């Protein structure tokens, strides 16, 4: 629904009042639809609960033959074919043993909590699409980033639905993007889609990136330690990493990174990463192969906003063998302000973990967050990590990186990480 507002928003020749009115309309619309969906959920719950009570009473008051027919009619054909006559009769007798008193239909606290979850899901899904209009000044750039975020959300929603329905997730995600592009934006005077044409190139990149498999989640950036994944016990995995930069002859700064992984889904938020006073939001797809040689790959697409504004395809990859891990985080920022602002960022790293609490290795980086005499800085790192928590599934980590040691542009990075 919010795409109807952002897609019909004319970015040229508008002022901040127009942006404000669009934001209020989009938020108000999703607020109303969130309430409607929550109420419909409660009505559906009561309806299903009442139907189940009527079915129970019908079975208890009917003849044995009719009772067995009621039970078969309530089942799907695939399940009904698996049951024998004796098993169906056993079910009917169990239903007869249930109390025959008049039950009252009512909602429980869990129903209200679920309805609140439906409301929040509908309403909060508005925020990622409208946030660019809040934090970015230029309306045209805001609209481009908003469209990109909408493409990502449509694609990931389609993949989740495809996975749940037993189809091919990336194909369903691609179909969701196409349907959203055809229905979410305005038409010009010739009847041709305008927003859809802007959606499809980004959609194509997402489809290609996610077309070759799926995998469990991955650990935090810069210090990869491959571990066995247990999605049934921990469906979500999070990590918070803060890098403190101490730079020779310049002011230092902090660089926080937050990640959230759920099986194949990878979400990430960064600040001061692509540039100072610049944030970025990312979504990606986790892949994993191998046992002795463990390979992990996460292609991503992100939106960059702040001092630098643009769109950035990226990739995080790692290859592990015994105590060794070779990893790289890289991206290419397409600056929407000027082509001269386009930049390739990379952080390759070789990690050696001789024991389960200590790691060290070599590292390099190419960044735009600060100016260095050397285009690619090289160095080494030493770190410590420890599993904590009652089940030892959380991990805290401290790592010191030293780039270009002994030069005039020596940079020290102190990294603190928490995975949970």
Image: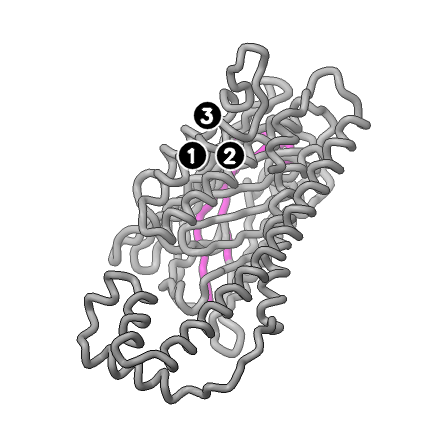
The circle on residue 200 is 3
The circle on residue 206 is 1
Q: Which residues are magenta?
A: 357-382
Task: Answer with mark 2 or mark 3, whichever residue precedes in sequence.
Answer: 2
The circle on residue 151 is 2
Disc 3 is placed on an element classified as helix
Nearer to us of marks 2 and 1 is 2
In the rendered view, tell whether residue 409 sits above or below residue 104: above
Return the x and y of residue 37 as percentages of the image width and height. 60, 52
Residues at circles 2 and 3 in contact by the CB criterion of under 8 Å: no
Return the x and y of residue 38 as percentages of the image width and height. 61, 56
- Quadrant in which the N terminus is drawn: top right
Query: Residue, x 59% and y 22% (percent of image)?
Result: 186
Disc 1 is placed on an element classified as helix
Query: Residue, x 60% and y 46% (percent of image)?
Result: 125
Structural crowding at the residue carrying mark 2, measured as other residues with C-alpha within 10 Å and reported as few (<14), some (14–19) or many (≥20): many
- Measured in 3D between alpha carbons, the distance from the residue under mark 2 to the one under mark 1, in whole angstroms, is 9 Å
- 364 or 204, which lies in front? 204
Disc 2 is placed on an element classified as helix
Residue 62 forms part of the magenta stretch: no
Relative horizontal placement of residue 332, taking residue 61 as reference (left or right): right
Residue 162 appears in the rendering: yes
Residue 372 figure quarter:
top right
Return the x and y of residue 268 as percentages of the image width and height. 54, 47
Task: Answer with mark 1 or mark 3, whichever residue precedes in sequence.
Answer: 3
């Amino acid at each position: 629904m919010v795409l109807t507002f952002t897609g019909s928003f004319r970015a040229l020749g508008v002022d901040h009042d127009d942006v404000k009115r669009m934001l209020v309309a989009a938020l108000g619309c999703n607020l109303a639809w969130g309430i409607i969906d929550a109420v419909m959920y409660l009505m559906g719950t009561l309806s299903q609960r009442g139907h189940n009570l009527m079915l129970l009473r019908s079975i208890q008051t009917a003849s044995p033959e009719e009772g067995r027919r009621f039970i078969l009619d309530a089942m799907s054909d695939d399940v009904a074919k698996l049951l024998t006559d004796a098993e169906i009769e056993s079910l009917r007798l169990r239903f007869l043993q249930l109390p025959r008193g008049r039950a009252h239909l009512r909602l429980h606290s869990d129903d209200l909590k679920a309805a609140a979850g439906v409301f929040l899901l509908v309403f909060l899904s508005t925020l990622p699409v409208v946030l660019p209009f809040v934090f970015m000044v230029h309306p045209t750039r805001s609209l481009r980033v908003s469209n990109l975020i909408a493409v990502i959300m449509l694609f990931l929603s389609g993949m989740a639905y495809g996975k749940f329905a037993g189809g091919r997730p990336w194909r369903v995600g691609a179909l969701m993007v196409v349907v959203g592009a055809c229905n979410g934006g305005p038409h010009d005077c010739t009847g041709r889609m305008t927003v859809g044409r802007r959606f499809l190139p980004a959609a194509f990149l997402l489809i290609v990136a996610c077309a070759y498999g799926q995998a469990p989640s991955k650990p935090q950036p810069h210090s990869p330690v491959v571990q066995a994944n247990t999605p049934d016990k921990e469906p979500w995995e999070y990590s918070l990493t803060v890098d403190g930069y101490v730079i020779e002859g310049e002011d230092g700064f902090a660089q926080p990174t937050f990640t959230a992984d759920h099986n194949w889904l990878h979400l990430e938020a960064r600040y001061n990463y692509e540039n100072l006073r610049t944030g970025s939001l990312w979504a990606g797809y986790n892949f994993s192969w191998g046992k002795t040689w463990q390979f992990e790959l996460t292609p991503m697409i992100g939106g960059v906003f702040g001092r630098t504004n643009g769109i950035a395809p990226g990739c995080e990859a790692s290859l592990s063998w015994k105590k060794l891990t070779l990893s790289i985080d890289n991206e290419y920022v397409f600056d929407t302000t000027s082509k001269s602002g386009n930049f390739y960022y990379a952080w390759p790293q070789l990690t050696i973990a001789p024991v389960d609490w200590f790691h060290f290795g070599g590292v390099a980086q190419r960044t735009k967050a600060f100016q260095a005499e050397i285009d690619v800085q090289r160095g080494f790192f030493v770190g410590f990590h420890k599993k904590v928590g009652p089940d030892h599934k959380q991990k805290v980590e401290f790592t010191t990186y030293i780039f270009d040691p002994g030069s005039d542009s020596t940079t020290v990075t102190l990294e603190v990480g928490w995975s949970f």
